[in-house]
Amino acid sequence: MLDERDRKLLELLQCDAGLSVVDLADRVALSVSACSRRIQRLEAEGYIARRTVVLDRGRLGVPTTVYALIRTAHHSSEWMERFAAVIADIPEVVEAHRLTGNVDYILKLALPRVEHYDVIYKKIIRKVELFDVSASISMETLKDGAPLPVDYAS
Amino acid sequence: MLDERDRKLLELLQCDAGLSVVDLADRVALSVSACSRRIQRLEAEGYIARRTVVLDRGRLGVPTTVYALIRTAHHSSEWMERFAAVIADIPEVVEAHRLTGNVDYILKLALPRVEHYDVIYKKIIRKVELFDVSASISMETLKDGAPLPVDYAS
DNA sequence: CGGCCATGCGCAAGGCGTTTGCGAGCATCG
DNA sequence: CGATGCTCGCAAACGCCTTGCGCATGGCCG
């Protein structure tokens, strides 16, 4: 049960969660106290899952993004669990999904440089058997961590 | 110039930026004031790019994740700019990269349901010509928004 | 139509976390 | 061996966030 102000708050907080409540308050034309309670409610009701910081990839030493499209050699729940465990243990894998279609899994890697991909590749195939892997290097990031659309929220 | 404490702070903040400075302080065995200054420094030196909130996809009404792998019909800088502009204007596209390899672009979409993909698909092809598009639906999210590895940071 | 209840706002005070000035310890370097 | 710079810890001050309270508004029922 969100009104226009709630949606605006979620939008603002996605862009900058460092904004003070007083800033947020007059952006949505509300008193500080009312705004504070709105935010508390949004957290209590689970709209806001957690707060985090986004770090500078360059500064962190992992400027390179690589996507790995994977096809599995085995279609069993045992293999799936094994694969999930392997992925979970590799911090360079920052995102991983099991997909429908030709590709079984997609992995997003954060790496110091392109050549480092091979290290991760070998680390994975040493532990699980894959049928096919194709890696694509990100040449240009058009969007990343873009705010989620807020218009579908009820 | 990061030491072990700085890295630990970045790690903790990625997991939960809502932690108070006093909490963080004793996690890294430091006084509150010293910890506060560390964090200020990490922000000033650009390690921390910004603070944000991660919203609940389900609550927001966009639980479905779809990846679109795109091959372009035209290889010109003019087309690229047009495509980038189109993508920027679609809030359901939460991530977009230009890639090397067979696939030219990868798009990550946040949608209310699978069928909604068609709406976005049509919105894109109405504005730019594509050679090939293949969409894969995420059946299972093994990782998403995982903390960046902090060990490569200097 | 009037009264009642629920909901949400604003005001102001209180509480709490964060920040900052200051002195001390330690390592580095001339 | 002494000076310099860096970072820590302590304590106070500052500022922000929270919360209790009174009030207005809108909906519902008698």
Image (cartoon, coloured by chain):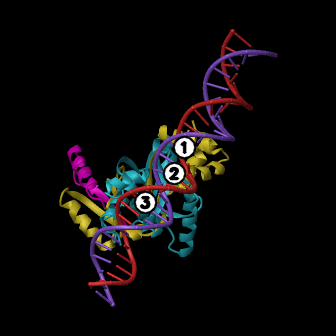
Chain colours: A yellow, B cyan, C purple, D red
Q: Residues within 10 Å of mark 3 (few under 14, many from 20)?
A: some
On the picture, is A150 further left or further right than A77? right
Give the image location of residue B67, x and y in percent. 43, 55
Residue tagged 3: B36
Tell me which amino acid carries mark 2: Leu
Question: Distance of mark 3 from mark 1, alpha carbons?
Answer: 24 Å
**Chain at numbered mark 2:** A
Q: Give the extent of the magenta segment.
A: A62-91
Give the image location of residue B47, x and y in percent. 42, 66
- Residue A49 seen by the camera: yes
- Taking the magenta stretch, the answer to whether it contains residue A71 is yes
Looking at the image, which is closer to me, A120 or A7? A7
In this view, B124 is above or below A50: below
SS for dot 3: helix
Q: Residues within 10 Å of mark 1 (few under 14, many from 20)?
A: many
**Chain at numbered mark 1:** A
Which label's residue is closer to the chain start, 1 or 2?
1
Question: Distance of mark 3 from mark 2, alpha carbons?
Answer: 31 Å
Closer to us: mark 3 or mark 2?
3
Q: Which mark is residue A39?
A: 1
Q: Quadrant of residue A64?
A: bottom left
Residue tagged 2: A148
Looking at this view, name the residue that lies furthest to the left: A126
